[in-house]
Each structure stands twice: as structure tokens, then as C-alpha cells.
Image: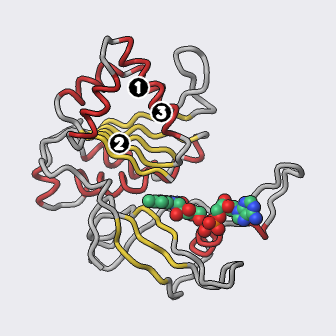
Amino acid sequence: MHYVEGQSLSVIPPGIAENGKPHKPRLYSIASTRYGDLLDGKTVSLCVRQAEYTDPETGTVDPTKAGVCSNFLCNVQKGDTVSVAGPVGKTMLLPEDPSTDIIMVATGTGIAPFRGFLHRLFMENTVARHMYTGNAWLILGVPVTGGLLYPQELELMQENANGNLEVSFAISREMKNASGGKLYVQDILAERSADLFSKLDSGAVIYFCGLKGMMPGILEALERVATQNDVDWETKFNELKANGQWHVEVY
Ligand code: FAD
């Protein structure tokens, strides 16, 4: 199966759903490059959050309501067969022009496609890496430091990138924004709005990936800072989408 960075894999969990039909497939962003983590083109990596259900009244985890596919994947054993389809997705592909700056905004498992991007642009010894002359900026949001995914890899990527990769962390329960509240990815975008708009005005491409709930706060913050800088956000937003500079994959 051939895939490229930023695509997703469709996983079909085994078994039968409550309606008596086979379980529906679930999508997972591919977290490796086209060569896979073993570099032989025969593997694919996913970054899966195990979905639990906590009863809001008792506060206890109810295993009968656990997420089907994420629990299947998190408990899979070496040698097990997993039914997959795909790859799918054209939303999160890297820009064709290797001089394009990229801005990646991720929360939680939203780091997955960007891990693929960064391995491609800064780690693997391929033409793609040698051709890339743009700058990459990753803004990563998690609640606590312990929830950071791939921290050692990110350090190595920064070392390899020779100053062309910036990583900004928004660790919401441990870091504070300018008004003393929790620091979220949108606070970094707002605090660094001059850099952000200057990059976008020069053709940078911005990607967002993670939980659906991240987008309203981000859009609100961008509209606020745009207005403060006398930028008509609606026009700018439509322009970014029309130019192919705006890419969102949230779930
Ligand atoms: P489901 O069985 O579908 O259940 C969904 C939720 O409902 C769970 O939280 C479950 O605990 C809860 N639930 C179950 N039964 C009940 C009940 N009776 N009452 C109340 N609640 C209940 N996920 C990732 O982890 N990593 C990724 O990289 C990723 N990429 C994605 C990319 C795309 C394009 C999309 C669309 C989605 C992506 N997802 C990703 C999400 C993923 O597809 C699944 O939606 C997710 O893993 C949950 O699936 P599940 O089968 O485990 O949960």
C-alpha cells in the first residue's frame, strides 16, 4: 500500500456492532513517512488515543462503553491481522513548492501527520529533505508535560533542522497566557500574530489537526488579532482558503 505524508488509514475493527452489522471503519492519521519507521516501505505508524468512557455521575470508567476501534488497536498483539483500507485524504498534504514555509498546529494525537512531515523534511536522507528550503513551525498543545508525544524525536528534529524548525509548546495546565489564564495553541498564535500574519502574507501554508473542539477558539483568536491589526479577517480567511494555504483535519 503506497501512501504519502499527511494521509489517513481506514481501520476496520473486527466484530459486529450493536445494530448487527460489521463495525464501521475508523480513520487514523498516518504518523510515518511513505517509507515507514523501518524505512523499508512496508510499515505504517499510527498514533492512537485509547477512547475510554467515564461516567459523569460516578466518575468511574465504564468499560462497556469503551471506544471500539481505538481499544482494538491499542490492545493488538504482534502477529495479529488488522483489516485496513486506504490510504485516504488530500487535505493534509505537504506543499509542492519546497520553499514554502509551513505552520502546523496540533493538539494531542493531531501531532500524527506532522510527525510524518517533519521526518520527511528534516530526518530522512532523501531528495525531499535536501530540496526543502522553507521554515517549519510546530505549535503543539497538550494538557500536561507527561502528555507530550514524541518529545525526544522533536528534539532530534530541531537539531537536524539547523534552525529551520521552531517548536512552540502550549501545555495548558502548566503554562500561562499573557492574561494569566491557561495557555492554549490559540494563545501562541495570538501572541505571535505578527510572525504568523507575515508568514501567511508571504505564502506560508497553515495546517490544523486534532480534536474538533480546538477550532472555535483558534478562529476566534485569529479574528480578534486580525481586527486589532486592522486586517479584515473574513477577507483574509477566504483568501487563505482560496490560495490553498489553509488546511484543517479535526475529528
Ligand atoms: P467509538 O466506539 O466510535 O466510540 C466513540 C466514543 O463514544 C468513545 O469515546 C466511546 O468511549 C464513547 N462511547 C461508546 N459507547 C458509548 C455510550 N453507550 N454512551 C456514551 N459514549 C459512548 N484518532 C486518533 O486517536 N488518532 C488519530 O490520528 C486520528 N485521526 C483521525 C483522522 C480523521 C480524518 C478522522 C475523521 C478521525 C481520526 N481519529 C483519530 C478519530 C478516530 O477515527 C476514532 O473516531 C476514535 O479512535 C474513536 O473511535 P473508537 O472506535 O475507539 O470509538
Q: CA distance from mark 2 to mark 1?
A: 15 Å
Q: From the top left corner, tell me how far across and down residue 172 is, in percent.
A: 58, 33
> Which residue lies under the disc numbered 2?
104
Please state the horizontal and vertical placement of residue 243, each as a whole percent of the image: 20, 40
User: Which of the pair 153/2 is nearer the observer?
Assistant: 2
The mark nearer the N terminus, 2 or 1, is 2
Which of the 4 quarters of the picture holds residue 54? bottom right
**Ligand 1 contact, mark 2 (Cβ < 8 Å):** no
Residue 222's label in the rendered image is: 1
Disc 3: which residue: 185
Amino acid tagged 1? Leu
Comparing labels 2 and 1, the label whose residue is closer to the camera: 1
Give the quarter the ligand 1 occupies. bottom right
Whether pointer 3 and pointer 2 mark residues with C-beta atoms closer than 8 Å, the reply is no
Q: Is residue 51 above or below residue 157?
A: below
Which badge, 1 or 3, comes first in the chain's sequence?
3
Q: Secondary structure at mark 1?
A: helix
Residue type of the residue flagged with mark 2: Met
182 vs 96: above or below: above
Residue 131, how many percent across, how many down? 10, 51
Judging from the image, what secondary structure is the residue with disc 2 in? strand
Q: Within 8 Å of ligand 1, the CB of disc 3?
A: no
Neighbour class for label 2 at 10 Å: few (<14), some, many (≥20)?
many
